[in-house]
Amino acid sequence: MRQFRALTGESVLQALLALRAQPLRSALALVGVVIGIVTVVLMASVLSGLRNQVALLFRELGTENVFVYHRSGDPYSSPSELEAGRRPLDPAFGPILAREAPSVSEVAAQLLVPAIAAGRPLIARSGRAESDTALIEAVTSNFFAVTGAEFAAGRPFTPLEERSRARVAVLGANVAGALFGPDPALGKSFRLAGDEWFVVGVAAPRKGGFFGENRQDNVIALPLATARQRFPEADALILYLRSEPGRRDAARLEAEWVLRRLRGLGPTEENDFNLSTADQIIGQFDRLAAGIGLVTVGLAAVSLLIGGIGIANVMLIGVTERTREIGLRRAVGARRREVLSQFLIEAVILSFAGGLAGVATAAGLGFLLSVLLPAFPSVPPLSIAAAGLASSLATGVVAGWWPARRAADLPPVEALRYE
Amino acid sequence: MPRCGATLPRVRIPRTVGRASHLETWRQAAAACFAHPLRTVLGALAIAAAVGTLILVETAVDTLAAYARESAARVFGAETFVVARIGSPGTLSRRELAARLERNRPIRRADVRALERFSQGRVVYAPTAQRAADVVAGGRRFEGASVSGTGAALPRLRDLGIAEGRFFLPMEERSGAQVVVIGADLAETLFPGRDALGASVRIGGRGFRVIGLQARLGTTGGVTLDRYAWMPLVAWERLFGPAETLQVSARAPEGEPVARAEDRARASLRALHQLAPGEEDDFDIVLPEAARSFVLALVDRVGAVTPILTAMALLAAIVVVTNTTLVSVAQRTWEIGVRRAVGATRGQIVREVLAESILVSLAGGVVAVVAVSALARVVASTTGLPVTLRTGTVVVALVAATLAGLVAGGYPARRAARVDVIQALRQE
């Protein structure tokens, strides 16, 4: 054991000396590995960061919540042919679900108002600015609590405002900025669809999003009752069921049962509505994104492959140049195994050093990128950094194997004769 | 007596002595490459990997685009265009959409009749209106079929794949006969094991006779083509009321360019709507929106990142070739010394070193082209995708390989040029 350790220590020393003997060559080979590792680690970090942002977006809507909609897929995109005929959900379902499903503690509703009403686009106008990209939604007063929305200023609607169909609104962070600039939006009013609406609350910027964009920041939230009266053609209703802690799956099953009864479905008929949870949506997204992720990281890995070729090349050149040295060493008793491990260790040291440098560079670049472009979170998580180091090690082993074998297989007599 | 190590006096050597022709340069470079085949192969391999990814990505993007176009052509026909109130609603902002809705008039049956009259048979039109509805036959129900009212000319515009029976005739279109052509899913669900031809179905409470069956068309770009029920537009309007606006598919006849047919359609509709020469159109004419499948949108997004990745790969490959060339130069120091001593200029040495690195890189580039085209052929034969390796891509790849070689050889060439002749001659 001690012998093995002494031998390995000696080999490492030899390897370092050999590398130092040809500094430029070794440095260039190392640079190749650094380029490869930086590419792979940075790419993987960016993808992981973006994915986490998306997951955060959905988790923010409530991990204990069950979402109900009358179609599957994104409520904001156009329906598939098959589901185009489905009836939307009735807001009256909300209280019924809360009452009849014991695992459901409360139900909030969100009505999506189409951007074009009666041929006219919905544009929000404050005194000096207007927004034609704000999304109009009508929500129940408990929506903000159920979806864990935080307020930068003001408060959500009160049930009284809802009952009396008051013209009040809660603005998302971006809309408030667009309409009122740096001034506080609280207490001001804006015009929408010919009416004047008063701002009673401004939501804090939401966490997470797609490339830094979170839908909810662009939303003008109106009370459900008021909006239904004002925009009768809006029918895309989403129900948010908050379940009792830890009983989300039970809540989902109970909700399904109640809804099937409410929709009058027979025992053989399939659901004409869709239930989903944040985890489910994130899972779907992951499945879709896995493919792209793999392809992108694969492309990045080509750089690492090329770095490996560089290491192999340098090793081969080294073997050729030191043929006499190898012959001599074998002649005085070194075994094949020792020669092999000698060169292998050299290759591994080179590529591992490249790996360390690469991970450090990627971390630095990633940090810089995150500061300059907040939409691209790219600080390498520990798992990816470790994977980067591991792959640099693997590259060294794989790249160095064949040259090391060639060195070990050199017939000693021929090697000694080599010019 | 001159001291040892002093430099030789500068002697002017006429340029013609020792001057190598260009061919000689390349031949020398090739000799240098073949002298150390293993090194050369590895260098070429590195460049091949980098250039290969470049070609692969470009080809993949081109193939997917071709596939999307082909799918759309299969559904809509290659020379078809669409006249509609709003052509591509997905691309418009809220304000533009509202403005268009206000300005553009809905297209009605009267418009279609006028279009046909004005075209004098030169353009083929088929108006379409569509709604989801249930189709019932003898106790069985098919939910959410795409019930489409259209014109008798539709089979000339779209490949409907009528396997049995026939499409309805212009006569039946005019009278709004209660006949229907159904898709494969409907036939299977409503008439399992039976021949659906001649049977009757009920849609929206009215009876229709099945006069034609579509073959199984499958799914293209995310749209299932087997859930349709085609009937004359007049019959459709009898069921669902007049359509708010019609989508009119149109096609230039064989041999005529699409642009001319489009112009004719535009002129006809403008005349019908009595638009003055300077006024804008109050309708849209578009090419049928190729199903913007999720894949294509994805490709766009990935396509933004790939240039960076290919650049990094190319950089790594350049580093490998630089390394290789440096070693080659170091090993031929003596040779370089001799050649300089007998009159070769620095420029010649530089050119030769560059030639060597370019040769290696170009070889790698050629290998990449050959490998990817072989792969493309294999993929095309096994999956049937329209794999297209454009000549433009090949040219770009080879140019990139050459430039990579040039860049890679730059530093070694400079080092070779700066070799001190005396020192070089002293090496063995």
Image (cartoon, helix red, strand yellow):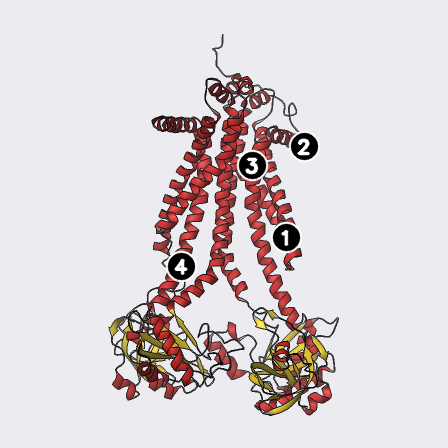
B119 over A358 or under it: above or below: below
Give the residue at x 49% y 60%: B301
Instruction: Tell me the tag on residue B42.
Output: 3
Give the residue at x 37% y 88%: A229
Q: Which amino acid does label 4 sit on?
A: Leu
Q: Name the residue under label 4.
A: A50
Q: Does mark 4 fall on the same chain as mark 2?
A: no
Q: In which quarter of the image is residue A18?
A: top left
Mark 1 and mark 4 residues within 8 Å of each other at the beta carbon: no
Depth order, front residue of B143/B250: B143
Q: Measured from the top left, where is residue A83 in percent x and y?
A: 50, 78
Disc 2 crowd rating (10 Å Cα; few below 14, some 14-19, many 20+) is few
Instruction: Tell me the tag on residue B376.
Output: 1
* Left or right: A272 as drawn, with respect to A104: right
Instruction: Tell me the tag on residue B23.
Output: 2
Between marks 3 and 1, how big is the CA–CA gap? 24 Å
Label 1's element? helix
Q: Which amino acid does label 2 sit on?
A: Leu
Which numbered disc flags the more N-terminal residue, 1 or 2?
2
Label 4's element? helix
